[in-house]
Each structure stands twice: as structure tokens, then as C-alpha cells.
């Protein structure tokens, strides 16, 4: 999978449980206090040039990947799921 640009959407949720913070600090050799966040991605999109078109490949957890292509003035079109 070479080339293109990848964007990831989602949320960063702060970890506030003291036990979880202590376990992480011990494993990482870090000193408390610090802020720790858990990533919760909701979508990843890879944008790349494919011949004369721009291809956008989107992945959402729990759904099949989909590819949308755009070129010139033609309306966007979707590839079959999973391609």
C-alpha cells in the first residue's frame, strides 16, 4: 500500500482511573502525574491518485471497506464493497 494520504477520525478519551495510570507508568517507566488518552478511531480514509481518478478508500469498524472514485466532471462512483 504505497502512496496517498491517510486521515483517521475518532475520539481521544482521557484515562482517569488511578490504577490504570499507575500500571501504565510502571510499564513505560514514566513518572506520575501525566495525561493518558485512549484512542477510539471511528473512520480511516486513504486518498490517492489512481490513473486519471482520485480514489478514496474508507474503512469504518464493523462495515466493509468502500472505495469511491472521482474523475473529471463525471459524478463520483463506488466500487463493489471490499475492493
Image (spheres, rainbow, N blue to C red):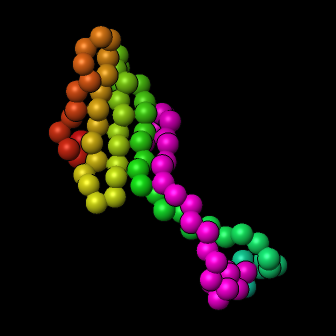
Reply above or below: 59 against 34.
above
At x 20% / y 44%, what residue is drawn? 81
Q: Is residue 10 magenta?
A: yes
| Rendered image quadrant of residue 12 | bottom right
At x 22% / y 27%, what residue is drawn? 77
The answer to whether 40 appears left or right of 66 in the picture is right
The residue nearer to you, when weighing 11 against 53, is 11
At x 48% / y 54%, what residue is drawn? 10
Q: Is residue 78 magenta?
A: no
Q: x%, y% of residue 16?
A: 64, 78
Regarding residue 23, the answer to whether it shows in the image is: no
Tell me the quarter of the image containing the C terminus. top left
| Rendered image quadrant of residue 58 | top left
Q: x%, y% of residue 36?
A: 67, 70
Regarding residue 17, the answer to whether it shows in the image is: yes
The count of marks equals: 0
Reply above or below: 14 against 65.
below
The answer to whether 70 appears left or right of 46 in the picture is left
The answer to whether 72 appears left or right of 3 in the picture is left
Q: Which residues are magenta?
A: 1-25
| Residue that protrudes farthest toward the top in the picture | 73
At x 32% / y 17%, what residue is drawn? 71
The residue nearer to you, when weighing 39 against 47, is 39
Q: x%, y% of residue 59?
A: 35, 49
Amino acid at each position: 500500500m504505497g502512496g496517498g494520504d491517510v486521515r483517521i477520525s475518532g475520539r481521544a478519551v482521557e484515562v482517569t482511573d488511578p490504577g490504570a495510570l499507575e500500571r501504565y507508568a510502571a510499564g513505560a517507566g514514566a513518572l506520575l502525574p501525566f495525561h493518558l488518552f485512549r484512542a477510539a478511531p471511528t473512520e480511516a480514509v486513504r486518498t490517492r491518485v489512481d490513473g486519471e481518478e482520485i480514489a478514496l478508500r474508507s474503512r469504518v469498524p464493523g462495515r466493509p471497506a468502500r472505495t469511491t472514485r472521482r474523475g473529471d466532471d463525471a459524478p463520483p462512483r463506488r466500487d463493489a464493497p471490499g475492493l
